[in-house]
Amino acid sequence: MTNMQLWLRLPLVKAEFTENEPADASNDCLSGILNDSWETWNSFRLLCEHHVQLCVALDIQSSLPSINSLLRWFGEPVRAAIVHTDAFLTNARGYPCLSKRHQKLITAFFDLGFQIVISGSLVHNIPQERVDVVPANDNDGPNEGAPVRHELKPYLEYVAYLYQRMDPLSEQERFELNYRDFLQAPLQPLMDNLEAQTYETFEKDTVKYSQYQRAICEALLDRVSDEQTSSSNTVLMVVGAGRGPLVRASLQAAKEVDRKIKVYAVEKNPNAVVTLHSLIKLEGWESLVTVISCDMRFWDAPEKADILVSELLGSFGDNELSPECLDGAQRFLKPDGISIPSAYTSYLQPITATKLYNDVKSNKDLAHMETPYVVKLHKVARLALAQPVFTFLHPEFSRKRNNQRYAKLRFEIPPDTGSTLVHGFAGYFDAVLYGDIHLSIEPSKPTPAMFSW
Ligand SMILES: C[S@@+](CC[C@H](N)C(=O)[O-])C[C@H]1O[C@@H](n2cnc3c(N)ncnc32)[C@H](O)[C@@H]1O
């Protein structure tokens, strides 16, 4: 039946073995489950060819396996975590509570949207004044009709308390909710002309522009000393200016550090150019900014730039053709000129991501399996640290410069993880705007509160 789901119920266990005491190699199903229930789940779902209606319910017991082995389940279609009453400890007042590790796990499960089910019999000696209950599964006792309190209510109340204690979602997280684990086709801003709506979304990311502003401030200070302030006019070119947020950041930076600048705003999207012209008129920047409606690779600039500012980065760094566009634009950068960004590096990380895998697979062709997507990753297990892949530096005046890259990476999965399934690779980037000012979505050093990419 298409609207039915089958939940495979498994204990959340993984035995830890030393080298001298290898895992039980027998095929016995129970020992398989007791050794590592993830392996049982994996065998079963492979036999079912990753069927989308096959999900998991996990039994949570009093002892938990290692954190790395637990993390594997974050990328699996877990629908429920069944917490047994005997997994609860007793607090000083005699009420049920959970160990710190269990608390963290349940909180993570809430974040991933897993249902929590409480199961078992009353094992706590709840203080007398609170026991006004009928036993579980017995609503027909002598007090029939009287208000009843389920005997497991104290356990439920404790779990509800863990839920209420969680930090509320930030404005950014609420904004991103609908994008979680949703496949989006990457933008192709060189081939396509972006829509007004897309620019509007970019422009909401104030953190991105304030990082650019900081970088431009630093570059202007390095370029023009305090003594030269009145005599020097720095030529700054924003290439791929869109509707003008980097032009604004440049003018604000110049004002902040008290340096004179002359700005060229180069943009090849004729629709964005119309908005850019209106912005300049509205702000009264006509004497400061010249708009050039042209592809940067073919523009014949009337003078050379001191600073070239661009934001042509994709989620994997170079995948929106920033290197190719900037190769063209650096023709009009002075030999000692500055490019912001000055470098960017892509990163890769193996992940388990059942939902994404099934979404891609539903297209039933190889082309979709070999397509990179933009995704706000949420229900995924990140199996190893991300590693750098390709780096591009700007400007790059060497005659031997070449945008072809090849990399071979070896990922080490932490040994206490157990077996894992790699559905694909998550890609990220880290960009050096100028000096030590970065834009990054790499998980170990993300730019705080930045939501682009
Ligand atoms: C990612 S958007 C950034 C827009 C804007 N700077 C911002 O931060 O909101 C990249 C912009 O570069 C423009 N672009 C891409 N390739 C270009 C090229 N070769 N010449 C001129 N503009 C280009 C696109 O049309 C788009 O407006």
Image (tube, helix red, strand yellow):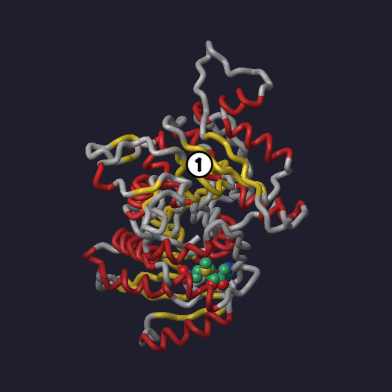
Residue found at x 53% / y 73%? 198
On screen, residue 370 above or below 236? above
Residue 435 makes an appearance in the image: no
Q: Is residue 251 left or right of residue 94?
A: right
Residue extending furthest toward the right:
365
Viewer can see residue 320: yes
Element marked by disc 1 = loop
Q: Nearer the viewer, residue 104 or 270?
A: 104
Query: Residue most toward the top?
Result: 20
Which residue sits at x=48%, y=71%? 201
Query: Where residue 226 sits: x, y (%)?
Result: 22, 64
Number of other residues with Cα within 10 Å of mark 1, as a class: few under 14, some 14 to 19, many 20 or more: many
The residue singled out by tag 1 in the image is 386
Considering the image in quadrants, where does the N terminus appear? bottom right
Which residue type carries mark 1?
Answer: Ala
Q: Position of residue 74 (x, y in %)?
A: 52, 44
Decide which of 215, 158 is in the foreground and name it: 158
Instruction: Give the residue at x 48% y 65%.
Output: 310
Position of residue 397 in the picture relative to residue 50 (left or right): left
Q: Nearer the viewer, residue 383 or 61?
A: 61
| Vertical side of 2 occupied by 291: above or below | below
